[in-house]
Amino acid sequence: MDGNLEYLASNLRESICLTAQALLLAFQHYIVNLGTTVLIASNIVPRMGGDHGDKARVIQVLLFMSGINTLLQTLVGSRLPTVMGASFAYTLPLLSIINDYNDEAFATPHDRFIHSMRTIQGSMIVSSFVNIILGYGRAWGELTSPIVVAPVVCHVGLGNRVEIGLPMLILVVISQKSLKRIHSRAHFILERFDLLFCIRIIWAFAAILTVLGPYNNVKTATKQSCRTDRSYLMSSAPWIKIPYPFQWGTPIFRASHVIGMIGAALVSSAESTGTFFAAAWLSGATAPPAHVLSRSIGLQGIGMLLEGLFGSLVGTTASFENVGLLGLTHIGSRRVASASGITFIQFANINSIRNIYVLGVSLFLRLSIPQYIAMNTAYDGHGPFNDILNTIFSSPATVVIVVGTILNTLEAIEEFHGGNQSSTAKATLEPRSSTAISSD
């Protein structure tokens, strides 16, 4: 009897320990996702005329929908350990909506914010059907040959965001390369929860600088990034807020805004594609087959439809920042994912000049085309092309998929016709040689 009780107590302690670790790891993923969400809301909501309370409500909706879409993907869609988070791909369509309403007269800035949110709702509801059709129509999965997937995953791993900051980077490097070697217990803790410790230390560092005042006389953008008393989210957010459908009012449908949002939907699908393959590689799973990938993109379209109904500011995409936490360290995970992109070439013929050509050109244009769009896009979102083209070609992931698919298809067609011509020529020459031999 005592042995059974000891056995049950041991299992209970182990279960509690594993549950606590799972909760801490989940909270770590939440913190990573929260940074992108707050950044998007802080940049967009003030331009729409919203106040701090509106910004807090928008963040709550974004986090709520991220949770819903994450559950949908992990349980039904890709079934990979990926977290769905707010996507930057929707920035240009949002800026276009904001610019259109800046010229209209509203009673208050808050009315302009509500009107903009209703327009975003309508645009997302309509554009969501593009992903649903591409996904459940099995069209999207057919685009993902290994030679196209390789540069896409490379792009995701070679991302160029620098929001974390130099002190955070230095601290993470020190803790990963030096501190965790002090003791075996420290190695276990820092390997899994290093991000939580580093964020707490850097936040305390920022709070000290806020009190000491080195950022009192700097630009507004610098204050927003470096001070801890400029977001006003804690004081503006309600304790409990559950989003509900059409909370901003009846959706507004405008064709010009819907077209731009369709481009953003395609871009978010391209980003999710690379992230799904990277997540599979980092977690030791097999690469998602075409039907699973199509199902995931179709389900992402359903999630976008829900986001439009619930009044989300932007749509969601599979977050590669969260996939990076699957790596053994937080330093090398993005580079490991870059390497994982190259490993997808093993499923193609690496001795083929055509495949190397497609890979090289895709990676090169991944840098040049989005850079051209960025250099020629104004502060209000006006770029060199219309909204849908600006949105599509400002995304490196989408550029890689478009260029890789086109080049791969054209080269395959050329090789096919070349092979037919060679076969025809060979068939034509052989009877002549046999006739000549018989006549002799």
Image (spheres, rainbow, N blue to C red):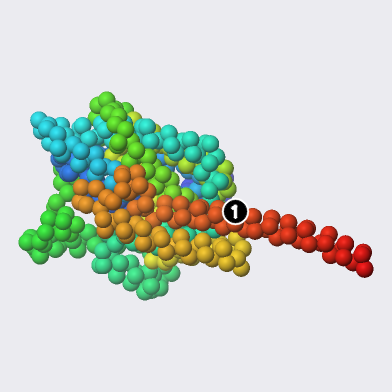
Residue closer to the observer: 86 or 187: 86
327 horizontally vs 431: left or right: left
Residue closer to the observer: 147 or 10: 147
Quarter holding residue 69: top left
In the orientation shown, which residue stands out farthest toward the left? Answer: 217
* Residue 9 appearing in the image: no
The amino acid type found where label 1 is placed reads: Ile
Q: Which residue is mark 1?
A: 413
Give residue 184's position: percent from left, percent from top. 43, 69
409 horizontally vs 439: left or right: left
Instruction: State the residue at coordinates (11%, 59%).
Output: 219
Circle 1: is it few (<14), some (14-19), or many (20+) Cα within 10 Å?
Answer: few
In the orientation shown, which residue stands out farthest toward the top? Answer: 250
- Quadrant position of the N terminus in the picture: top right
* Residue 372 appearing in the image: yes
Give residue 298's position: percent from left, percent from top. 48, 38
Give residue 99's position: percent from left, percent from top. 20, 41
252 horizontally vs 411: left or right: left
Give residue 310's position: percent from left, percent from top. 32, 32
